[in-house]
Image (cartoon, grey):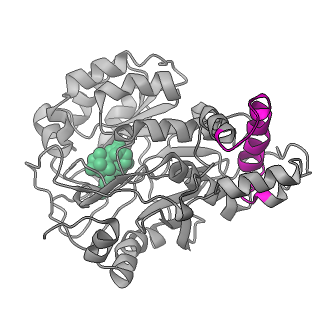
């Protein structure tokens, strides 16, 4: 097993309604972007702010400029090292300064609506964000590490024809607080924050040791918030995950790829899925804007490329569509020269999906060709299968039970007219 290759990285979503994308889907769909509501009382949230933003916010609230840097350090440590979300227990701050913070700010992360735990330990959280919308976050424990798969958007504006998220009509970018908040709520649930006063809190291997941006949404279409959230996750005075333990998956938003290396510095995974433009145009329609050659040229330049930082090529196995021996051979030819690993994902079927999962023997044959060409080619074994299907359904089932789409839209102040 190659390090940093997530076992399971996509979340199947089964929306209650929505058109099934055909093979000729447009690059982006007709979506409703959901406006974001201000938090109750209009107080800004300190969570999700970069150090510079927090510095400015504390000064704006009346912190003397000379003290601001120290205050940021203190608050930062409470929030991200100790996992504290209550100003009143920040005991190294004077009482009236705690009162000032309390009067001016909130400390909010998304709320866990429900949690399912699989027999194999996989945990799936249904998470409610501002405005009542929901995303999913999945924690996958392994022997020597634990990976958290987080979402960056509600829905997705892109229309990959095998992906159910792309059929969801309501889309909004998650805020940095909602992105880093998924890491925080998982650490809450795992009980992984050190107790204040217990030293550094660095006690052996982490339960939550890796983060993959492979949940709902296209992270590179929410670049700034994803970057800010990951900077917080990587900050050494807090959660302190190394950049090499974070993997961002993109369908291929070429202009943002170099920025990912420069401004985040994390590992990269590419939803490749096809070896000819003809097929990739249908599976990953963003290919019509940035085709295979353009994408691969950009990847060749990914500034941080090295053998220890290989790019993961994700490849969904679709029966009779992209799974032939010729495809496998083309794949290794195409990526020649790029330090890479290939992650084969057996297609996760959903009702009405226009594809089927490749047969197991076909997937193994495909993997073998890749392996013999010198690449690690792990087949992503489904984890938490017993809750996986239920969970994809859970989201829509919960939404159906509690709220209709019309209700959600009314709350968000949009109307679909359909
Ligand atoms: N939008 C980003 C990240 C989210 S999807 C991207 O496309 O890369 C994470 C991975 O799961 C992607 O490789 C995606 O193509 C894959 N995926 C989506 N739906 C799937 C399905 N039904 N079966 C298997 N893989 C799927
Ligand atoms: Fe799904 Fe990713 Fe394509 Fe969006 S970009 S439709 S999340 S595979």
- Magenta span: helix, strand or loop, mainly? helix
The span shown in magenta is 60-87
Q: Dividing the picture into quarters, in which one does residue 51 lie?
A: top right
Query: Where does residue 190 sit, x and y in percent of width and height?
Result: 69, 61
Q: In front: 52, or 202? A: 52
Q: In front: 117, or 226? A: 226
Give the side of residue 144 with respect to residue 150, left or right. right
Give the side of residue 273 with respect to residue 133, left or right. left
Q: Is residue 130 above or below residue 199?
A: below
* Residue 86 painted magenta: yes
> Where, quadrant-wise, is the N terminus in this rendering?
top right
Which residue ends up furthest to the left in the rendered image?
24
Query: Where does residue 98 sit, x and y in percent of width and height?
Result: 80, 53
> Where, quadrant-wise, is the C terminus in this rendering?
bottom left
Q: In front: 306, or 382? A: 306
Query: Where does residue 10 sit, x and y in percent of width and height?
Result: 40, 53
Query: Where does residue 206 sit, x and y in percent of width and height?
Result: 72, 48
Residue at screen point 52% across, 25% down: 309
* Residue 222 painted magenta: no
Camera sees residue 346: no
Residue at screen point 42% across, 24% down: 259
Residue at screen point 60% across, 58% down: 108
Q: Is residue 331 above or below residue 321?
A: above
Q: In front: 253, or 85? A: 85
Residue at screen point 34% across, 71% down: 411
């Amino acid at each position: 097993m190659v390090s940093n290759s997530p076992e399971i990285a996509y979340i199947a979503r089964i929306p209650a309604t929505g058109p099934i994308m055909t093979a000729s889907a447009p690059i982006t769909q007709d979506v409703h972007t959901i406006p974001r509501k201000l938090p109750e009382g209009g107080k800004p949230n300190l969570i999700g702010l970069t150090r510079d933003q927090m510095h400015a916010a504390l000064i704006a609230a009346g912190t003397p400029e000379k003290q601001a840097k120290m205050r940021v350090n203190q608050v930062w440590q409470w929030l991200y090292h100790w996992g504290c979300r209550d100003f009143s227990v920040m005991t190294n701050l004077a009482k009236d300064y705690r009162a000032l913070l309390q009067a001016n700010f909130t400390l909010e992360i998304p709320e866990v609506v429900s949690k399912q735990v699989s027999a194999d330990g996989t945990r799936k959280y249904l998470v409610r964000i501002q405005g009542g919308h929901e995303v999913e976050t999945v924690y996958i424990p392994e022997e020597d590490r634990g990976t958290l798969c987080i979402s960056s958007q509600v829905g997705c504006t892109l229309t990959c024809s095998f992906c159910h998220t792309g059929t969801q009509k309501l889309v909004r970018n998650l805020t940095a607080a909602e992105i880093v908040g998924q890491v925080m709520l998982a650490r809450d649930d795992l009980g992984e924050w050190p107790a204040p006063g217990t030293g550094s809190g660095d006690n052996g291997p982490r339960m939550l040791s890796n983060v993959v941006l492979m949940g709902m949404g296209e992270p590179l279409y929410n670049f700034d918030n994803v970057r800010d959230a990951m900077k917080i996750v990587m900050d050494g005075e807090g959660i302190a995950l190394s950049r090499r333990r974070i993997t961002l998956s993109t369908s291929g938003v070429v202009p943002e790829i170099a920025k990912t290396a420069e401004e985040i510095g994390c590992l990269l995974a590419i939803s490749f899925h096809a070896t000819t433009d003809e097929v990739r145009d249908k599976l990953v329609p963003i290919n019509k804007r940035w085709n295979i050659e353009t994408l691969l040229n950009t990847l060749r330049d990914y500034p941080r490329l090295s053998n220890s930082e290989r790019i993961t090529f994700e490849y969904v196995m679709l029966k009779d569509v992209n799974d032939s021996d010729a495809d496998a051979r083309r794949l290794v030819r195409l990526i020649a020269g790029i330090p890479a690993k290939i992650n084969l994902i057996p297609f996760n079927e959903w009702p009405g999906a226009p594809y089927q999962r490749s047969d197991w023997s076909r997937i193994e044959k495909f993997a073998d060709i890749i392996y013999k060409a010198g690449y690690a080619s792990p087949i992503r074994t489904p984890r938490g299968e017993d809750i996986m299907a239920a969970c994809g359904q859970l989201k829509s089932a919960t939404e159906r039970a509690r709220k209709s789409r019309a209700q959600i839209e009314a709350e968000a102040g949009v109307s679909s007219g359909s």
